[in-house]
Image: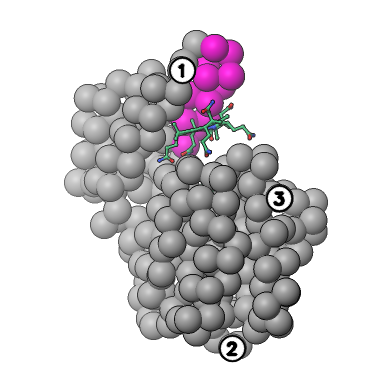
Amino acid sequence: MEYDTIKTAMAELDEDVLLEEMRKVADGDGTAEEALEACQKGMDEVGRLFEEGEYFVGDLIFAGEIMTEAVELIKPRLAGTGGGSYGKMLIATVKNDLHDIGKNIVKIILEAGGFDVLDLGTDVSPEAIVEAARENGIRIIALSGVLTLSIESMKETVDAFTAAGMRDGVKIVIGGAPITEAACERVGADAWTKSPQKALAYCREWAQNA
Ligand code: B12
């Protein structure tokens, strides 16, 4: 399997080649995880070209569309992480952030891993997240954010749980490109990771010890 072809096709926004290669993965070539990683590396390149003024917002939108299509193709293979029923949890991209490709991938892995995931979408306010958790009796929350600014929205979200008197009753994992240990400390989340698989492991542990 030539993962470099996937990476380059993603970076060059070559939809035909990207989807052709991803269909091969869907049919059993290589591993879905490595194909996903190659897409992501291509996306990093897209981000870099955007920063350099080579690509415009329209290119980002198109990149988002083709990556979503690509991931959709390998979804059945990504979902092979084992079942079980771990109950309900919630996922959202935080306030002011419209990026949802990463969130959708995390959701696929969590669902495949046995969670019933309530997806609140993108640009979700702290109040809406707290309210949805309360209404649905949800104790495990995953927050996604790709903009640096999203770290502040995540902090506001954790603070909103505290203000609602619910902080001790929930576990919160945060993730996304700008998330680091320092960001996690600032936000006051229970865990952070960029890896959907690791997030699944945290959430399973929390569900079992709830
Ligand atoms: C595609 C894209 C867009 C698309 C998004 C389409 C969509 N449906 O999501 C659109 C066109 C909407 C967009 C808009 C903008 N974007 Co944009 N975008 C990107 C781009 C190229 C790719 C993002 C992506 O999907 N990556 C692929 C996914 C799979 O990766 P991921 O999100 O990191 O997720 C993975 C992990 O982080 C993790 N993860 C993600 N969430 C979570 C959550 C949990 C709980 C866990 C555990 C893990 C986890 O798992 C995922 C799988 O491994 C990035 C550059 C980049 N390399 O990231 C810029 C980028 C994020 N955008 C950027 C900017 C500036 C913008 C705009 C402001 C542009 C503008 N001038 O309008 C707007 C902002 C809109 C808004 N308010 O949100 C900057 C952000 C700079 C910053 N640090 O704040 C970036 C970094 C580009 C750049 N280098 O300048 N963008």
If the image is split into quadrants, where does the N terminus sit?
top left
* Residue 151 appears anywhere in the view: yes
If the image is split into quadrants, where does the C terminus sit?
bottom right
Q: What residue is disc 1 on?
A: 56
CA–CA distance between discs 3 and 2?
28 Å
Residue 61: x percent and y percent?
Answer: 38, 30
Q: What residue is disc 2 on?
A: 210
Label 1 is placed on what type of residue?
Answer: Phe
Q: Which SS class for mark 2? A: loop
Determine whether, in the image, residue 190 is placed left or right of residue 15. Answer: right
* Residue nearest the observer in this picture, 207 or 141: 141
Per the rendering, the mark at residue 152 is 3
Circle 3 Cα neighbour tier, 10 Å, few/some/many (<14 / 14–19 / ≥20): some
CA–CA distance between discs 3 and 1?
26 Å
Q: Which residues are magenta?
A: 40-53
Q: Establish if 53 lies above or below 133.
A: above
Q: Which SS class for mark 3? A: helix
Circle 2 Cα neighbour tier, 10 Å, few/some/many (<14 / 14–19 / ≥20): few
Circle 1 Cα neighbour tier, 10 Å, few/some/many (<14 / 14–19 / ≥20): some
Mark 2 or mark 3, which is nearer the start of the sequence? 3
Q: Which SS class for mark 1? A: loop
Q: Residue at x 68, y 68 (%)?
A: 160
Q: Establish if 77 lies above or below 70.
A: below
Identify the image quadrant of residue 82: bottom left
Determine whether, in the image, residue 49 is placed left or right of residue 117. Answer: right
Q: Are marks 3 and 2 in contact (CB under 8 Å)?
A: no
Q: Residue at x 50, y 84 (%)?
A: 137
